[in-house]
Image (cartoon, helix red, strand yellow):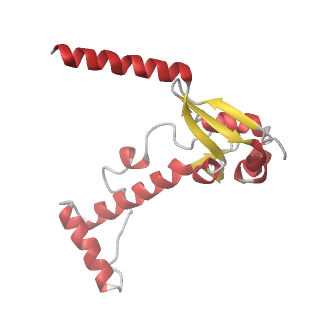
Amino acid sequence: MKKQKLLLVRATRLVNHEWDLSAARRGAAGAAARKTGMTLEGFLRAFTRGKLRSKPHGGLQETAGLQVPAGFKVEPCNDKAMWSRVERGAEFDETSIELFLWRAICSWVDCAEEDMVIHPRTGQSIARGCELREDALSLRLSRAGLADEQARRAIGTAKAATV
C-alpha cells in the first residue's frame, strides 16, 4: 500500500491544515498551482494562510451597498409572483426596491469573492476555495494552540467561580 504524502500548514496560532498532496495534485489545487506557476506546496501554504484572497479591504456591500449608484435602474419583470416577492422584501427592509436589489447584488458579489482564489500576479480568479478545501484532510488545533486555549478556558472558569 502506498504511503500517503501529507503537508501540514499552520494557518493560525490555533489551527493547522493537513493536506493530502496526492489528492491535491490531481484536484483543483493542482490545477490552480499550475496556473500560478507555484509549487503545489507553496500554493497550498499561500492559500491556507489567506494570501490568495480576492477582497483584502472589506466587502462591496460595506463600501458601495449603502446607496444606489447613479445610473442603476430597475424595471419590473414580467413574472408577477417574483416581482411581488421583491416588493415584499424591500418593504420588509423599509427601503426602496432599487436599494433592496442593489444590496442583494452587492451581497452576491461579496459571497462570490469570498470563495475566489486569486492569481497573485494577474488578479484573475483561478479557483473556488470550497473546491480546494475538499483536499484538506483535517483542520486541527495545534498542540501549542490547544494548550493556550485550555489555559485560557481554565483561567476563565476560575474567574467565574470566584465571582
Say left or right for 54 vs 155: right
Determine the residue positioned at 41% across, 60% down.
Answer: 105
Q: Position of residue 145 (x, y in %)?
A: 50, 22
Say left or right for 138 vs 149: right
Q: Position of residue 156 (x, y in %)?
A: 29, 19
Q: Nearer the viewer, residue 89 or 148?
A: 148
Q: Nearer the viewer, residue 96 or 112?
A: 112
Q: Nearer the viewer, residue 91 or 128?
A: 128
- Note whether residue 120 is visible: no
Quarter the C terminus occupies:
top left
The image quadrant of residue 154 is: top left
Q: Position of residue 93 (x, y in %)?
A: 21, 60
Q: Position of residue 126 (x, y in %)?
A: 68, 51
Determine the residue positioned at 68% across, 44% down.
Answer: 119
Determine the residue positioned at 35% across, 85% down.
Answer: 79
The image quadrant of residue 4 is: top right
Determine the residue positioned at 84% across, 45% down.
Answer: 2
- Note whether residue 107 is visible: yes
Q: How many labels sit on residues?
A: 0
